[in-house]
Amino acid sequence: MYVTISTDTAAGVHPIPQSAGHPRARTRIAEGAYLFFEGDEVDNLYLIESGSVRLTRVLEDGRRQIIAFGFPGDIIGFPAEGLYNTDCDALRDAVLRPIPRRLLEDGSADPALHKALMAAALREISGMQDHFMMLGRKSASEKVASFLGALSERVGTRGAGAPEITLPMGRADIADFLGLTTETVSRCFSALRKSGVIRLRGIHTVEILAADALAQRAQSQLN
Amino acid sequence: MYVTISTDTAAGVHPIPQSAGHPRARTRIAEGAYLFFEGDEVDNLYLIESGSVRLTRVLEDGRRQIIAFGFPGDIIGFPAEGLYNTDCDALRDAVLRPIPRRLLEDGSADPALHKALMAAALREISGMQDHFMMLGRKSASEKVASFLGALSERVGTRGAGAPEITLPMGRADIADFLGLTTETVSRCFSALRKSGVIRLRGIHTVEILAADALAQRAQSQLN
DNA sequence: CGGGCGCTTGAGTTAAATCAACACAAGTGG
DNA sequence: CCACTTGTGTTGATTTAACTCAAGCGCCCG
């Protein structure tokens, strides 16, 4: 999840063929369990079918950066020099479809899937570039607003009432994704709440009362 | 240039075949000239043969983030949904080998090149993740030290004397790459100079007097 | 030689981090 | 069933790293 990929873009243009990979095989990981670690040999990529995961990098001294959150429809586990380049664990119980690595590297075995994987990798590059802009050049409140806006696009419900997001991650995860502290994230949530842009229905459910105002705040810091 | 890609890794493992693309064709761009803009249709990727380029994204209000610097051996211009996702202009006069986009997307035309391009894209993803860690979780002095260390690895000279880097970019570019201001970058350079880690021979030439100390400072802020 | 741009340095300000306390819910065990 | 612990989130007070504003310097180029 790289903050700008809309559901349309992510799922629509190059859908993963149903027949892909091991058509039947599924990998299940329980909340908190790890799927792989940075430096492990890559055997499979994974298509997330349900649940959500967290891709992290850690510095020796413990500082952590969340590289991405993975939601249903996302493909995770692209190798660099044959190795995973992040840790991956489940935020919520997840079901994944393994896709053998050779289908990424060898175009002849399944051309359609190969193309879809390639497109996913390229989309990942593009999405990460938005994340750069966010990490490097946005204020705390802009970051949080951008994050909520992107999540709303990607995994929000769009029913009759106000759009709603269920956050599978905690404040600390959001902080580590945005390059902030939990306190700052919390304060930004509070500010959005107090100005009527969002409403919190429990800690993990965000109602978006004013999507336009949220979009404003994602680009300029008019409190 | 994504801050951790060593020359070995970048050039060694999956070299771009000499025959690639239009074997003879070359594109030349003069210092300051643009090669492409964000949103342009991608016709070619480019292998940088000489010179250096700058890949940037700009926010409506003018805030700028440099996504990457491109040096000889790098491949730039990976499309997302068929479009370039950054602007690209030359820091120094550059010579580029165009590689038709279809050779990335169609594996059958030139399998070896296709594989090499795929590997380059995957390496790019991995490299960007290091950049995330840097933007999100490192202090200004750590960022600058990391940057100089990475540049030294990538384009430094390693002769008899002290290793040396020729910076093709100005302080403002470094700032926009690291998510800092020019003033802060300048102060970090001065701090490194005053503590004897580097020496400046003119504004664009950095001698690394203590590579070990530089590496230290890239990970922990012992001034 | 003069002008201008890019770099450096200093002083003051500010956004976010840090430090600290507290609230609240969920889970545990007596 | 209630005390107690534990984890997570919120809020407040204070500190600090980096930004902003401002001035000066030096180098390149006409």
Image (cartoon, coloured by chain):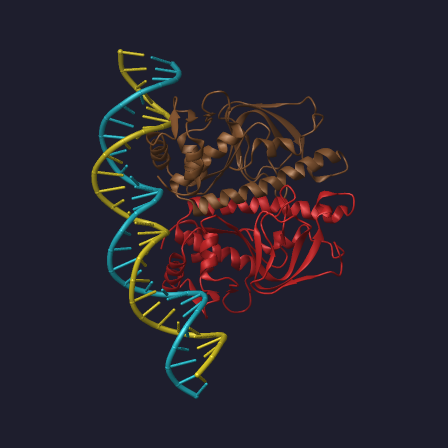
Chain colours: A red, B brown, C yellow, D cyan
Q: Nearer the viewer, residue A166 or B134?
A: B134
Whether residue B22 sits left or right of residue A67 in the image: it is right
Pinpoint residue B192: horizontal percent, then vertical percent: 36, 32
Question: Looking at the image, is B161 positioned above or below residue A172?
Answer: above
For the C terminus of chain B, give its image quadrant: top left
Q: Nearer the viewer, residue A88 or A103?
A: A88
Pinpoint residue A13: horizontal percent, then vertical percent: 66, 50
Question: Looking at the image, is B111 positioned above or below residue A217?
Answer: above
Q: Nearer the viewer, residue A83 or B64?
A: A83
Residue at the image position 73 percent from the left and 46 percent from the top: A102
Question: Can I make out residue B135 in this image?
Answer: yes
Give the mark count: 0
Question: Can I make out residue B62 in this image?
Answer: no
Pinpoint residue A25: horizontal percent, then vertical percent: 73, 60
Pinpoint residue B170: horizontal percent, then vertical percent: 42, 29
Residue at the image position 36 percent from the left and 35 percent from the top: B188
Question: Looking at the image, is C21 positioned above or below residue B140?
Answer: below
Whether residue A31 sits left or right of residue B167 in the image: it is right
**View extreme (right): residue:** A109
